[in-house]
Structures are given as structure tokens and as C-alpha cells.
Amino acid sequence: MQKEKIKILYIDDEIENLLGFKASFRFRYDIFTASNSTEALSILEQNPQISIIISDQRMPEKSGVEIFEEVFIAFPLPVRILMTGFSDVEAVIEAINRGHVFRYVKKPWDEEDIILAIEEAYKYYITNSLLSIKNDELKRAYAELDKFSYSVVHDLRGPIMSIRGAIELLNSEDDIEAIRSMLFLISVSAQKLDEFIDSIHEHYKINRGDLTIEKIDFIKLIEDLKSVYSVSTIVNNIKFIAHLDEPYEFRSDLMSLRLILNNLLSNAFKYQNKSNLNKWVELNIVVEKDKVRITVKDNGIGINENYLNQIFNMFYRATSEEFGSGFGLYNVKEVLKKIDGEINVKSKLDEGTEFEVIIPSKK
Amino acid sequence: MAQSTHYIIIDDNEIDIFIATKMIELSFPNAHIITFNNASDALEMVKKNPFKKPAIMLVDINMPLMNGFQFMEEFEKLSDETKSLFIPYFLTSSINESDVAFAKTFKTIRKYINKPLTSSCILDL
């Protein structure tokens, strides 16, 4: 298997050394060279994959240690190896303490020594960068967990408290009609609870699930969606219009696509203006070369402009009309990240909302 | 405490509004109850001072757009004369310590009540 070459930056003021180093190691490694700190910084800027920096210590403008120190501020991750021809104890101590140097190599170099130092340094780099990636992931997960546990307490406990309240009322009620209406409230609360648990489950499926890339059968998908929303169409008198333009083949993960469409459509059906006599929801699917453009449009209550940039946040709700978990659009955004898609929204209060989703086709 | 017969309920959940209304009516069949499903409408009404008599105000905490805390912040900025006509309580399903602690920072709040609202709870208001 062809492994990607380790990328190394070598800093030395003497051109012969730069050329010599490159000549000796260019087959084994990907070598970049610089003769001063300004050059070094601009190379690091352009090549974030560089994992090891090797520098000569004795240079006229700045010492190797000084360059390491300067570079460390903006690029702390690459591992540093110092090279010097003088057995300068001061320099060694300084290198370790100030320059965050991993290894110290004698000059003129021995090829084996350099290779060994580089291999060791690379192992150290991989462990460290993995650690920092994991650390960031962990921080994010913790922040999410905090938000999550707060909201779970409210969103799970809320409906349970409603049920307990209704039961309390039932105890002092003899009228059968009143009892029926309270039982109805209990069942609505239980349904909320169930919906919330569903969206948590959906959320974890997104984070843990693998993608299965296949050819998407949009005709079948639209048929499925039409049958899902047929009840809402009849009961709430909402017209559901779906257009499909499919001149190309489109490949992606069907489950992700379903999740996105289900969330956008259920919002479009839910946030309707009840007094409007001409309610509609429009779904447009246009397959272009290499991507699909999906729009979900409604003439419902719309979203206040001030809240538009927050609607994709976890647990954010922009309205007190209707029950919402504040989970739906967050889940949509998360799943789009996984399949490299993007989402845009346009909305006007009391006029309606339009979501546009663009997803690239996978091989 | 003298029992007020005027009540204001502020809660985004219609079911909880219904339950609280019924509960109050069970104890006080002649109570005057006004309900709001969002805090900003409630704030507008409070500013207009609809009652001559003091009203008990039950405020939910976790509501979209303007939550109970934001509502109370605005309420506490009103004139003493206006404030004296309302007796606010938090009525919430939240048991988060941070919410309980923050609720205590409002001077005018009488008590933090956990849902569900019970008849003994109403008699204590």
C-alpha cells in the first residue's frame, strides 16, 4: 500500500546544506526547505500537513532555538529536531527548555541517525495530534451533554408533569365528558414524550450511523412522503405539491435524505397559519450533474428574521405556536455535515418559509 | 395570607394552562383567570394594569423567545405601584439546580413551585 510521505521542513542558512539534505532524503520524505524564519513561517502557513521541523542551530540572524520559539506560537503541533555541529551544552539545554525540541542530532549528520529521529518524531506527532483532535471532540461532546441534560430534564419532565397534573384533576372529576377530555390531554402529552424520545434516537443514529451510498429512487421517495403526509393533507386541508426533475442519476445515503426531508416537511406542515384557507407545502427536487437541489416551501407562519440564524441550534425554538423539541433542524444540519451538504433558509413572518438543500452526489 | 381571586397564568404549553386553570377553579369557582401562551403578550398586559386588585401570577420558566427569567427581569423594572398589583410565582417542571438558584435572585418572586400544580399548593398561594 502506498503510504503518504512524511512532510518535513528543513531550515538552514547554508544553501549547500539545504540541497544536500533534500538530495539525501527526498525519496523517503517530502522535503521543504527554508533559509530563515520568515520563509519557514510562510511555508508552514501554506503546508499545514508538515509534521516535523528540523533546524540548524548556528545561523547568522537567529539561532535554531530562536526560530523554533517564534514558530511555536503559530504552529505548536509540528515536532522539532535541532541539528548542530558544535557540542554546545548551553544550546542543548536552551533547545529543550525554550524551543520545545524533541531530538538533538549531531552535524555532520549520519543518515541513519536522522531517519531514526524522524521516525520517532513522527510517532510522537501522530499521538499528539490524535490527542488534540480527540480532546476537541471531547470538549464538544461535553458541551453538548450539558445542554442536553438540561433540556432533557425540561423536555422529558414537562410532559410527565402535565400527565400528573391531568391525573390530579381526574381524581376530582365525575363528569364523563370532562374525564374524556383530560384523557385526551394525557395522550397528547404522552405523544410529545414519544416524539422527543424519537428525535433523541435520531440524533444518536446520525452520530453513530454509517452511510450507505446507493442510487436514490426519488419517485419512490416522493410517493412515501406523500403517503406519510396524506393524513395532514386531508385533516388540516393543506395542499402538498411535489415536483421532480431527474435528468441525471443521484447517489447518496437514503436514510440521511429521508431524515432531512421528514424534518423539513413536518415543519412545513406543522407551522401553518390555521386561519389561511389556501394552505400549501411545495417540494421541489432537481437533480443536476453531480448534485441535487431540494427546496421545501410553505405559506405558513414564517420565522422572524431576528431568529433565523439561531434555528439550527440545538434546542432552539423560534415560536411558541405548536409543540417542537428544538431538535429537528439541528439534526438536519448534523446529517448534512456527514453527507457534505448545505442548507439555506429564506423566511418572512406571516408569509412563509423556504429551505434549500444542496447535496453532492457520491461515487 | 388573604386569598386573591385574580390569577394570571403564563405558560407556552396549552395543556399546563388548562390544568392550572381547572385546578384553580376547583378551589375557587369564582376566580378570574387570564392566560398567556407567551411571555411578551403577558408583559404588555401587565404594563396596562388590568385589575384593581392584586393578582397572583404563575410564570413558567422554559418558554421559547422570552423565557420566564427574561419576563421577570422586565417585570422588576416596572414601577413599584405596578409591581405591587402582582404576586409572582415561578411554576415550572425544571428541577435544574441552576434554574432554582437563578430564580432566587428575583426579589419579587414569592416561591418556586414545581409542576404539577396541586390544590393544596393553590391554597398556599
Image (cartoon, coloured by chain):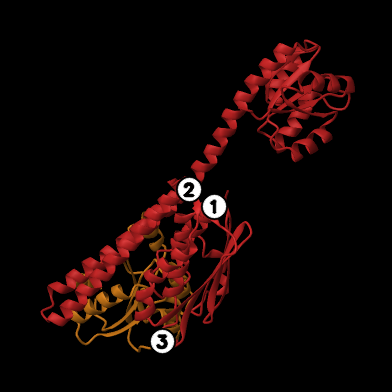
Chain colours: A red, B orange
Relative side of A323 to A246, left or right: left
Residue holding disc 1:
A339
Disc 3 residue type?
Answer: Asn
Q: CA distance from mark 2 to mark 1?
A: 8 Å
Q: CA distance from mark 3 to mark 2?
A: 58 Å
Q: Residue furthest left?
A: A174
Which mark, by number, is residue B49? 3
- Kindly indicate whether the residues beneath marks 1 and 3 are on one polypeptide chain: no
Disc 1 residue type?
Answer: Ile
Q: Are marks 2 and 1 in contact (CB under 8 Å)?
A: yes
Near mark 1 (Cα within 10 A), the count class, few <14, some 14-19 or many ≥20, is some
Q: Earlier in the sequence, mark 2 or mark 1?
A: 2
Near mark 2 (Cα within 10 A), the count class, few <14, some 14-19 or many ≥20, is some
Residue holding disc 2:
A211
Q: Nearer the viewer, residue A163 or B33?
A: A163
Q: Nearer the viewer, residue A58 or A133?
A: A133
- Where does residue A152 sit, x and y in percent of width and height? 36, 56
**Badge 1 element:** loop
Residue drawn at 18 percent across, 73 percent down: A169
- Where does residue A167 sit, x and y in percent of width and height? 18, 69
**Badge 3 element:** loop
In what quadrant of the picture does the C terminus of chain B appear?
bottom left
- Kindly indicate whether the residues beneath marks 2 and 1 are on one polypeptide chain: yes
Location of residue A48 with respect to B28 vertically, above or below: above
Residue drawn at 53 percent across, 50 percent down: A338
**Badge 2 element:** loop
Residue drawn at 75 percent across, 11 percent down: A110
- Label 3 is found on which chain of the structure? B
Instruction: Tell me the mark number nearer the camera, choosing from 1 and 3.
Output: 1
